Amino acid sequence: MRKLQLLLTAALFALPASASALDYQEEIRPILNKKCFKCHSGPRAKGKLRMDSPSFFQKRVGGDDPAIVPGNSAQSLLAIKAGLPASDGDAMPPPPARSRGAEPMTQLELNTVKKWIDEGASFEAGGATAATTTTPTEATAGGEAMRKDELLDWTNGAGNSLKAYFVGLDEANVKLKKEDGSEFSYPLANLNAESQALAKKLGGQ
Ligand code: HEC
């Protein structure tokens, strides 16, 4: 859904959509659960690398003895070991365990984990970017709760929406600011009636 929304956003505003941040709980934990928790959970986790509890796991993210270097999957022991071939004694799961049925990550799983690390290895829902975002407000024209400093829903005539802050209104264009801070103008006439009314209201027209 999130990807779809971003695709629609890109099509609607013809601007590059910011990359969607991977969600730890939704996308990363299930992979680790399936492939690594067997030996890396609980107080007796192997290699003192406990992955089942974020508070323990995070102790090995960054710091002096990192299993994960945020922003750098190539330097992250976890991704390096998971990516080694079964012929390598340092591979994870360890080769002897593999012969007893412990499966390594698939290429897709490994790439997903690497991407999450490269994005900063955030444990917050929706990744690091979402953590700083205010709760979106219902953007119904005439609603009293809407404010300029809130992330609002904007919908165009075709029914596609994106979330952005209102910056200003100059004649025929509404100026909006996306979550990543980039500003852009959009023709007022291309928004649906509700969003047009919202822009005019916020713009004081
Ligand atoms: C069958 C048990 C088993 C499974 C499954 C397993 N590991 Fe391990 N892991 C170990 C053992 C034993 C060690 C400690 C010895 C070593 O470092 O080789 C270890 C150590 C590690 C270390 C090094 C920790 C440190 O700082 O020394 C990393 C990183 C790691 N595992 C990652 C993974 C990942 C990622 C997975 C899932 C793809 C995984 N392991 C699955 C048994 C396992």
Image (tube, helix red, strand yellow):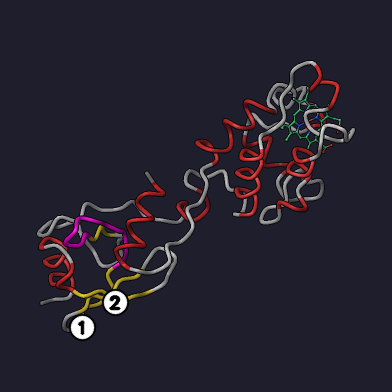
| Three-letter code for the amino acid on which mark 1 is drawn | Asp
Q: Are marks 1 and 2 in contact (CB under 8 Å)?
A: yes
Q: CA distance from mark 1 to mark 2?
A: 9 Å
Placement of 193 over or under 47, stated as above or below:
below
Pinpoint residue 10: horizontal percent, then vertical percent: 36, 62
| Three-letter code for the amino acid on which mark 2 is drawn | Ser
Residue found at x 16% / y 84%: 171
Residue under label 1, please give it. Answer: 170
Q: Residue 164: within the magenta?
A: yes
Which label's residue is closer to the chain start, 1 or 2? 1
Q: Residue 135: within the magenta?
A: no
Q: Nearer the viewer, residue 70 or 87?
A: 87
- Left or right relative to 148: residue 65: right
Span shown in magenta = 155-165
Ligand 1 image position (quadrant): top right
The label number, if any, that marks residue 149 in the structure image: none
Placement of 20 over or under 60, stated as above or below:
below
* Residue 185 falls in image quadrant: bottom left
Pinpoint residue 151: horizontal percent, then vertical percent: 31, 60
Residue found at x 41% / y 72%: 182
* Residue 15 falls in image quadrant: bottom left
Residue under label 2, please give it. Answer: 185
Q: Nearer the viewer, residue 12 or 123?
A: 12
Pinpoint residue 73: horizontal percent, then vertical percent: 71, 51
